[in-house]
Image (tube, rainbow, N blue to C red):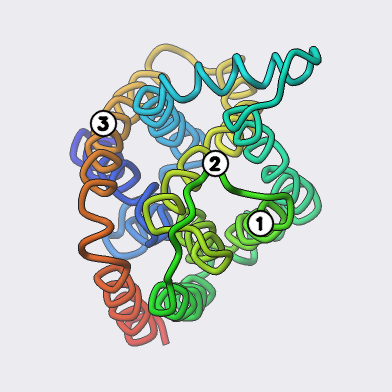
Amino acid sequence: MDFIQILVLGLVQGLTEFLPISSSAHLILVPELTGWPDQGLAFDVSVHLGTLSAVILYFRRELISMSRSWTASVTGKGFDQEARLAWAVLLGTIPVGIAGLAFKDVVETTLRSPFVIASATLVFGLLLWWADARCRGERNEHSIGWKDVLIIGIGQALALIPGTSRSGATMTAGLMVGLSRKASARFSFLLSIPVIVLAGGLEIIEYLETANIADIQPLLLGALISGVSAFICIHYFLKVLENIGMLPFVIYRLALAGFLYLVFA
């Protein structure tokens, strides 16, 4: 991989991971549209770890507080709203973990086609528009109940389909259960942490066992680029979300789906 390809793919991952437009779809489509060779699973995992670092750094204070409260809840020393949120993140990860194990081969092969990506981009874009248009939610992420966790967790499992967007699916589900736009986004970002750890941890460890230094350098550079761009994206997305809503992202998804149908039909 040359520097331009690493730069473009790192930026694509960093800027799309937390926006409701599907980072996995863009990572698949960029090589398709540019003629570049597929960057491979190892590079995909490395840029995802870059975005993982970004979200952990951005929510570091909340994560420390949640960890303390969760530990207290486990040891019987109290159960506050931070412990409730921590349990919601952990339990909300179960559906995608089960679905990922059950459908791993299908997701990595059959579903990585432009037609599937275009269809998922269209359908889940319309669902996002519908949920956002009817959004009257005033609830914050600390009010999430177990039924809410189940619905959002199922949404995250559906996002294994390339083009769906993990953040888009979880934000859509969050809006559907009455969370505010900002709360939906914040919970979606927190929910991404265990998912990225589970999805990328094993693959990157297995790859590093056989990799040499020359192989690792592009991965580290891609992770750095994706991490910095993701941190900036999270910061500004949360600042402007309540004002702009989801409509710009819905329009982008519909335009992208139409373009893909035209190019790959």
Which mark sits nearer the N-terminus, 1 or 3?
1
- Callout 3, which amino acid? Ile
Badge 2 is on which residue?
Answer: 142
Label 3 crowd (10 A; few <14 / some 14-19 / many >=20): many
- Callout 1, which amino acid? Asp
Q: Nearer the viewer, residue 237 or 87?
A: 87
Which mark sits nearer the N-terminus, 2 or 1?
2
Cα gap from disc 3 to disc 2, whole angstroms: 32 Å
Label 1 crowd (10 A; few <14 / some 14-19 / many >=20): some
Helix, strand or loop for disc 3:
helix
Of circles 2 and 1, which is in front? 2
Q: Is residue 222 left or right of residue 162?
A: left
Helix, strand or loop for disc 1:
helix
In percent of the image, x 75 and y 53: which residue is there? 99
Helix, strand or loop for disc 2:
helix
Q: Nearer the viewer, residue 126 or 162?
A: 126
Q: Position of residue 194 (x, y in %)?
A: 60, 33
Displayed quadrant of residue 118: bottom left
Q: How many marks?
A: 3
Q: Nearer the viewer, residue 15 or 129?
A: 129
Q: Position of residue 144 (x, y in %)?
A: 61, 49
- Callout 2, which amino acid? His
In the rendered image, the quadrant that contains the N terminus is top left
Badge 1 is on which residue?
Answer: 148
Of circles 1 and 3, which is in front? 1
In percent of the image, x 61 and y 55: which residue is there? 156
Above-or-below relation of 167 to 49? below
Badge 3 is on which residue?
Answer: 225
Q: Position of residue 185 (x, y in %)?
A: 42, 50
Above-or-below relation of 15 to 150? above
